[in-house]
Image (cartoon, rainbow, N blue to C red):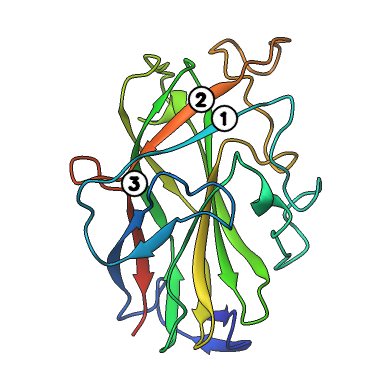
Amino acid sequence: MHYFMIGENRWRDSGSWPPAGTREQCWYLHSGGNANTASGDGTITETAPGTEMPDLFVSDPAHPVLSNRGTHNSLGCYDRREEETRADVLVYTMPVREKPLAVTGSVRLRFHAAVSAPDTDFVVHLLDVTPDGRSLWLTDGVLRARYRNGTEKAELLVPNEITEFEVVLNDIAAAFLPGHALRIELCGQNFPAYGRNPNTGNEYTTDPELRCAAVTVYHDAEHPAELLLPVLP
């Protein structure tokens, strides 16, 4: 099979997907409790967390975080710096790469959160921060909380109870080159690429009510937030 490696901007060949030799690496989210916006203190390292303050954002379906300034994610690697100025977007960034990091396959984010509402969405964006400061979208994934254990059965949240979630992103092949940095965003809406979640727990296709949901994201020793990367040496 052929696949295109973003960053290297060239086609590669492989007899399987993910390519042979791909191994999963576990990285961890960190902050001092202020990961909101790209100017916050959110980081990604290979060091497991200790005692850390959680991060908080409010998901407001009346003022959703937008996908590509209000269009679908179909226009390639667009710049999300504008969205990263919003307080309802948590941003975590690796140190600038000294060596290439090739990610080939499906990225996953496993974390714990407490939500004030009976349902909400979690959206994770994977981005490449370029040497000139652009934050380029590569891929994303979304989880509707009521389907966290599978789409066969809806299970509403117990408000403010700490719950484990895992967001699986769409497959990607991207090389983060020296001078670049890997970044993720975590937020509660991605409109209009995905329909808004009213956060009420009611039937979301017909519910006229829109409710804000306060979301507390944990990343401490008891509740590590793990970014699982399929890495090709």
| Residue positioned 58% across, 60% down in the render | 139
- Frontmost residue, 133 versus 227: 133
Of label 2 and label 3, which has the lower sequence position?
Answer: 3
Of label 1 and label 3, which has the lower sequence position?
Answer: 1
Of label 2 and label 1, which has the lower sequence position?
Answer: 1
Viewer-nearest of labels 1 and 3? 1
- Frontmost residue, 221 versus 4: 221
Report the residue marked by disc 2: 214
User: Does residue 151 appear in this view?
Assistant: no
Q: Which amino acid type is marked by label 2? A: Ala
Examine the rendered structure and indicate whether residue 176 appears above or below residue 158. below
Residue 96, image x, y percentages = 47, 79
Q: How many marks?
A: 3
The answer to whether marks 1 and 3 mark residues whose Cβ atoms lie closer than 8 Å is no
Q: Which amino acid type is marked by label 1? A: Val
The CA distance from mark 2 to mark 1 is 4 Å
Residue 144, image x, y percentages = 51, 31
The answer to whether marks 2 and 1 mark residues whose Cβ atoms lie closer than 8 Å is yes
The answer to whether marks 2 and 3 mark residues whose Cβ atoms lie closer than 8 Å is no
SS state under label 1: strand
| Residue positioned 68% across, 71% down in the render | 134
Crowding near the residue tagged with mark 3, few <14, some 14–19, many ≥20 C-alpha atoms within 10 Å: some
The numbered disc on residue 110 is 3
Report the residue marked by disc 1: 58
